[in-house]
Image (tube, coloured by chain):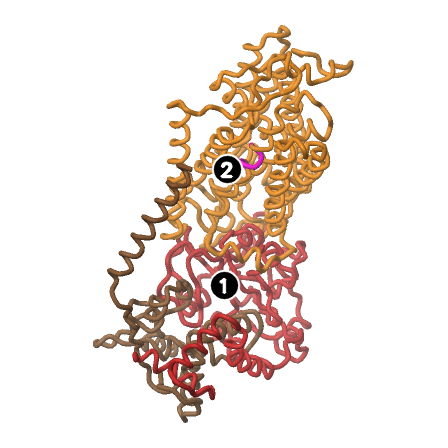
Chain colours: A orange, B red, C brown
Amino acid sequence: MGKVTYREIAGQGAAYWTAVLACALVAAAGLGAALYMRAEGHHVSGMNEQIVWGMPHVFAVFLIVAASGALNVASIASVFGRSLYKPLARLSGLLAVALLIGGLWNLVLDLGRPGHILAAVLYPNFRSIFAWNIYLYTGFLVIVGFYLWFMMERRLNPHTHAVGVLAFLWRLVLTTGTGSIFGFLAARSAYDSAVMAPLFILMSFAFGLAIFVLVLMAGFHVVGRPIGARLLARLKTLLAVFVAGVMYFVAVFHLTNLYMAGHRGVESFLLVTGGIYPALFWGGQVLIGGVVPLVLLLRRRPPGDAPGLTRVLAWAAALVVFGGLCQVYVIIIGGQAYPLQLFPGMIVHSSFYDGVVHSYIPRWPETTLAVSGVAVVGLIVLLAVRLLPFLPESLADEVVSAHAPPPKAGEPAVGA
Amino acid sequence: MTDEDREIQGAGAAGGEAGAPDAVRRRLLAMAGAAAALVLAPGVTVLARDLAVKGARGGRVRYGLLIDARACRTGCDACVRACQDYNGLSRDPGPDNAQWIRKVTITDPGTGFTRSFPVMCQHCADGACVDVCPTGASFRRPDGIVLVDKHRCIGCRYCLMACPYKARSFVGRNVTDQRPWAPRGKGTAEGCTLCVERVTAGDLPACVAACQRAGHKAMTFGNLHDPKSAIAVRLSEVATTTLRADLGMRPGVHYRGI
Amino acid sequence: MRRRAGVLAVVAVLLAIGLVWAAHRGPVVVPVIPRAPGHCVLPIGQMRRTHMMLLRAVRQEIVRHDARDTRFRISGCVACHAQDTPSGRPIPVNAPGQFCAVCHAYVGVHIDCFACHAAVPPSRRLVARLAGQGVEQVEFRIPQALRAQFAGGAVSGGGQ
């Protein structure tokens, strides 16, 4: 006991290679779909002049937001010194990198001219939050790369704290930037709010941790390594706090808009009259992605019940991921479906769909591309954990507790 | 020796570098390998000279429009058709097709007041499309015209998200029948150019010309910064407004009677 | 060691395939460039070496500033260099064997100019139709002016 040992997974079995192959195939299908859209133009997708960002952007924003959140576990360990989480830090960093690459895969392949992406580097426009994000994303990859290196190279271990602090601050700025892509859009009544930035940060906490938990538990289950109840209980509490945080900011966002008379049109669209969007909001985001996980996570459980904890945590995390996708869909697609208020208070007609609610029906090319971003994440994680020692051999209670100081008063008790 | 070689040798000779074919070839190779600047110097010199005489780019010019919604006829779409014809746009108003200019009809639900008038790119002084573009492809020229530089456009569609006037479109199809004076292509954003080719040559934008031909005179084009221009005089005399003036983007298109 | 030998073997096989393929292509065929009437805006040798830089610099000036000297614009190239079919229909300059494509295929340089730019001059019918509507074609004037300017043979060269 004492030292945590990390080991590559064996990855010899048929299951491993099936998973790798499946991810590779889906990724290749997404690439093919993107090339098809590139060759034929975006009219083969469900996106059009009204709904200009579609499924690839929903998944891209979800993955990018989750990427910065996935790094939180590492940050808790090396920035805030909670050594209980330290054995998880490597996987946390890996997932952060993989999720960001998956998101960028979607974003870049959906561009009208992905081959011209270098223009963004050659002629950056620093008034554009998009241009800033390009640097935030690449910087994030570099910093987390160093972070992982410092964690894995024994001689560099003492400097991990410094890189960890930098990575943590960077990820806060990054998610602020991602949220501001929407928050800075004064033209669209569904965005145009400074709350977008903190909302996205909270979303990143919740989505990132949920994905991290799912990957951790799935991985450990498949390779047969143990996770102790102590760690599970801590993750459970953490996830509950993050989910509640998201719900708080969502409530603030909508209440603010409801209070401002000029925004009531878009609010009634998103919350009541908008068809699919209110359904996804109340059913997907609030109920399945918020209330149910909170009930699952906060219900008292007998201490030390590892199998029960695992089940509850897995379900809650999966629901948070589903609710998160609903939430991003409502933000991105719902925000565009509501017509631009070119003449506030007027009834507007034109040949260009002014004043009417726009419809978006995803078609296969962009949906395939969207899902392929997830496959890219899977592929990166699967290959990385086989090639490098990312996963600890054991997260059983005696291992993590030997590593962590005993719980202090005020900390959530085991099984809370 | 092939035709190509003779041409190359000829070019060398014209530059005052006559010599044996081998020597020319060696020299060319050396040039290519060592000093690209040297190779490019003649062309760039010519260019620099040409551009130096081009004249001032100062802010003395800001092109703009004044649209008189009272004179605009409901049901008339001469401006829209002229734009489509001149710029080679589709006449099909499908959800995938660009509309650089469109006729909008507004009705006040309280009073029943109704007006019909064209809306296009408002050529803002502080346009959101210019601010959000990651590559600076969406930009404002010194003469006030807001354009998409398609050489830089990567097709991210952020300008379509940001424009409050729905004035930007995205080309989602292969285009082969462009007008030589209005390049447009798949995977790039586009919008009203204020017929920049015609305007720089001293002509009116196609929509304005069409409106005048139709006898409605609902559109006036001119230099907003020239106090003696017809548009500036008119703007100083009558009450006009800009669309979504609350957003502070300072459009170059003014409306009367809405 | 075994791994290194494997890598070497793969490299050797790839090299061999490349050599065989290159040998099969036979002697390099020098492109035959379709000729255009009149004189170019610059000596041909200079044009061959610098046209890409000229177009690149000129597009910057024409699009982003308000340059009016438009001698080097791409529509000028197309206006002179687009060939006609025997029936009189213009052939795009980027079609196989045509002015732009023939050299760019030879040197293996991909261009996407004509994704946006017209690869044929405007048809007489279009010009006539627009002129009938009182819409004079600014752009169409340019090649004429250009030809007038350079028809005097101010520049030497083969006349492409």
Residue A251 can be seen, yes or no: no
Closer to us: A251 or C159? C159
Q: Amino acid at mark 1?
A: His
Pointer 2 local density, CA inside 10 Å: few below 14, some 14–19, many at least 20: many
- In the image, the segment drawn in magenta is A95-99
Which residue is denoted by mark 1 in the rendering?
B151
Closer to us: A129 or B241? A129
Image: B112 above or below A371? below
What subunit carries mark 1?
B
Residue A206 at what x, y percent from top left? 61, 28
Residue at (49, 79) in percent of width and height: C70
The circle drawn on residue A59 is 2
Majority secondary structure of the magenta segment?
A: helix
Q: Residue furthest front?
A: C1
Work out which quarter of the rendered image holds the C terminus of chain A and state it.
top right
Q: Amino acid at mark 2?
A: Phe
Per the image, label 2 sits on a secondary structure element best described as helix
Image: B177 above or below A17? below
Residue A170 at what x, y percent from top left? 67, 41
Closer to us: A188 or C82? C82
Task: Write down the quadrant of residue A250 in the picture.
Answer: top right
